[in-house]
Amino acid sequence: MHQSAQQEAKSTEQGARSKVESVQHGDLSSLLQRSIVNLKAPLRDRKNIWTWCVVASAVVILLDIIVPSPYRSASVLLAIVGSFWALAFYFHWRRANDARFVKELLSEFNDRYDKLGSDLQFAIWNRGDFEKETQLKFIRYFNLCAEEWLYWKAGFIYEEVWRAWENGMKQYGRDPRVMALWKREEATDSYYGFDFPSVETLRQQKTEI
């Protein structure tokens, strides 16, 4: 039984190392998707960590009571329960760090959009082709949207926040000039797989509904 535990721990360690190596060689998208102990939604998935810790500790203590006395070991019991609580504190610490990280993300994204928003709206209201400076501003906006999408896909952005941002993107996606510029930029394949919401996308969503 002891050898089996050692083999399992060794295989777990090897698996963790292989994950680290794959992250080092991956692109930005894979890095975000595999970050924070490979959780899809790092903030939402850790709310019940204390409950799971209490339940797991209770189960282990109950098993220790049921097991015949010759096989009981107080040191092993303390080690297992202590490991559960150490993990709980670790995940709680990571969750606090994630919350600070999300706050910084939201502040950064909102600041970047505030510097572009009024100019983008003014460009939409005016007719005629976009000037070069306006095109560059929309390209910066595309980059911002792609980063927002990437962090949402990685689980760092709440669904409600993303829907609000996406609704803002859709108002620009109705403008043919914006979509023509996006199609040209999309061909560069430098937006992590992000697809800017277009009129066609809106029609497809309405059809599905």
Image (spheres, rainbow, N blue to C red):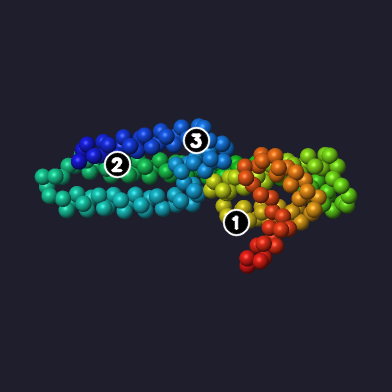
Q: Mark 3 highlights which residue?
A: 23
Q: Mark 2 highlights which residue?
A: 82
Residue pictured at 47% horizontal, 46% vertical: 39
In x, y percent, where is residue 73? 17, 42
Q: Are marks 1 and 3 in contact (CB under 8 Å)?
A: no
Tell me which label, 1 or 3, sits earlier in the chain: 3
- The quadrant in which residue 146 appears is top right
**Nearer to us: label 3 or label 2:** 3
Residue pictured at 49% horizontal, 35% vertical: 23
Quick check: 127 above or below 35?
below
Tell me which label, 2 or 1, sits earlier in the chain: 2
Which is nearer the eye, 165 or 153?
153
On residue 160, the disc is 1
Residue pictured at 23% horizontal, 50% vertical: 61
Tell me which amino acid carries mark 2.
Gly
Quadrant holding the N terminus = top left
Side (left or right) of 60 relative to 35:
left
